[in-house]
Amino acid sequence: MAILHKAQITPSKLELLSSWLPRQPWYDGPAEPVLARVAAARFDDPEGEVGIETLLVRAGDGPVLHVPLTYRGAPLAGAEEFLVGTTQHSVLGERWVYDGTGDPAYLAEAARVIRKSGHQAAEQVDTGGELVSRDPDLTLSGSGSPGSAGPISVQVNRIPTIAVDPADEGVLTGCWSGQETPVVLVHLRRS
């Protein structure tokens, strides 16, 4: 279960991403994007220390972009190139926000959800002492994979337009309002 806090976050995730996205080699949009949140869902960190989110955003009428993020209470050693920025969280304090593709917590949890045919975490919002259930607006589904022997790599599909073949194994798919047909967000690949 992912526990979220009703909090002020400064700068916001979208503000951080607006300055970070144009510096990414895979981004092909305006230099100063105005981003809109499309959908999001959370994964559980087994250690309970890292916030793990699958976030979909869009700049204007451009394509939907898949930006997995992690939120940490301290810098992640060796991951400077994946740092999106820092925010002030009114409940948790300073948070370091990383592109999930460079955070072992995201990579491990995405691989686990895929291998185990799992889904997004149940979300609970702490409203100041009371936990209230919230439905994510992004449905995530792992396909399972044929065994776990041998090294694998996790490949994130930044522009999720690839339809799912029913025979696909080793993928994480997503559906959201306006995209009811599952599309591939993440692949597990044999290294």
Image (cartoon, rainbow, N blue to C red):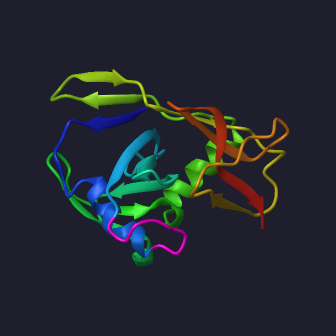
Residue 75, can we see it? no
Q: Residue at x 20, y 36 (%)?
A: 6
In the rendered image, residue 75, in percent from the top left (x then y), is placed at 33, 69
Q: Which residue is drawn at 50% across and 56% down?
A: 105
11 sits to left or right of 140: left
In the rendered image, residue 148, in percent from the top left (x then y), is placed at 78, 51
In the rendered image, residue 5, in percent from the top left (x then y), is placed at 24, 37
Q: Residue at x 53, y 63 (%)?
A: 101
In the rendered image, residue 8, in percent from the top left (x then y), is placed at 16, 45
Looking at the image, residue 168 lies above or below residue 13: above
Q: In which quarter of the image is residue 169?
A: top right
75 sits to left or right of 178: left
Give 58 or 135, whichever is nearer the viewer: 58
In the rendered image, the quadrant that contains the C terminus is: bottom right
Residue 112, can we see it? yes
Q: Does the magenta stretch include residue 76?
A: no
Residues drawn in magenta: 24-32
In the rendered image, the quadrant that contains the N terminus is: top left
Looking at the image, residue 86 lies above or below residue 126: below
Q: Main secondary structure of the magenta part?
A: loop
Looking at the image, residue 34 lies above or below residue 24: above
